[in-house]
Image: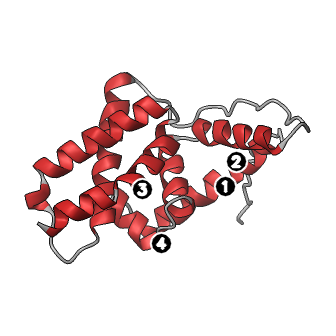
Amino acid sequence: MDEAKRLVELIPRLRRYARALVGERSSADDLVQDTLERAWAKLHLYRRGTDLRAWLFTVMHNVHVNRVRATRSSDPLEEEMPELAQRGTQSDALLVRDLDRAVARLPADQRAVLLLVTLEEMSYEQVARTLGIPIGTVMSRLSRAREKLRAMMLGQSPSAKLTLVK
């Protein structure tokens, strides 16, 4: 069974994405395990000839969303972005730590798009298929995520760029 072999080959990518998505190693490993369990049980739904990696990331995304929904009773759409502490000049490790924390503070939908595009190097079209959203939504979420990250890394609040249309 070729798909089973490919599932095993994709585990390192799943672990990397899960680690970036949830932040904690043990939670990431649990997410990968749950994803593989669900993928194995639903392997008959996979259409041969399509991108198995994208299908697995879709499964992982859905498992993660279900977990988040189960743990949160309500999630405000737009939370005020908390400020990051100013970056120390000791080493680049502090910058990486701050970036990791800033990514973790992004809204889940923006974080998912950002990680799939930057970490997994998926095209916008692959991300759109994986998350089940239009390509335009992928582009807007990625743009908002990058702007919020930029602002948080500079210690600023994200600016709302509104244009007056007459």
Whether residue 134 can be seen here = no
Res 29 quadrant in image: top left
Q: Is residue 4 above or below residue 135?
A: above
Q: How many marks?
A: 4
- Give the number of the mark in front: 4 or 1: 4
Q: Earlier in the sequence, mark 3 or mark 1?
A: 3
Q: Earlier in the sequence, mark 4 or mark 3?
A: 3
Residue at mark 1 to residue at mark 2: CA–CA distance:
5 Å
Residue at mark 4 to residue at mark 1: CA–CA distance:
16 Å
Residue 99 location (% of width, % of height)? 70, 43
Give the residue type at disc 2.
Leu
Q: Crowdedness of circle 1 by 10 Å Cα count: few (<14), some, many (20+)?
A: some
Q: Which mark is residue 123?
A: 4
Q: Crowdedness of circle 2 by 10 Å Cα count: few (<14), some, many (20+)?
A: many
- The residue that label 1 is drawn on is 146
Q: Are marks 1 and 2 in contact (CB under 8 Å)?
A: yes
Residue at mark 3 to residue at mark 2: CA–CA distance:
23 Å
Residue at mark 2 to residue at mark 4: CA–CA distance:
20 Å
Residue 32 location (% of width, % of height)? 33, 42
Residue 49 location (% of width, % of height)? 20, 78
Image quarter hosting the N terminus: bottom left
- Give the number of the mark in front: 4 or 3: 3
Residue 64 location (% of width, % of height)? 35, 39
Q: Are marks 3 and 1 in contact (CB under 8 Å)?
A: no
Check the image and name the residue furthest to the bottom.
49
Q: Is residue 2 left or right of residue 26?
A: left
Give the residue type at disc 4.
Ser
Residue at mark 3 to residue at mark 1: CA–CA distance:
22 Å
Q: Which mark is residue 13?
A: 3
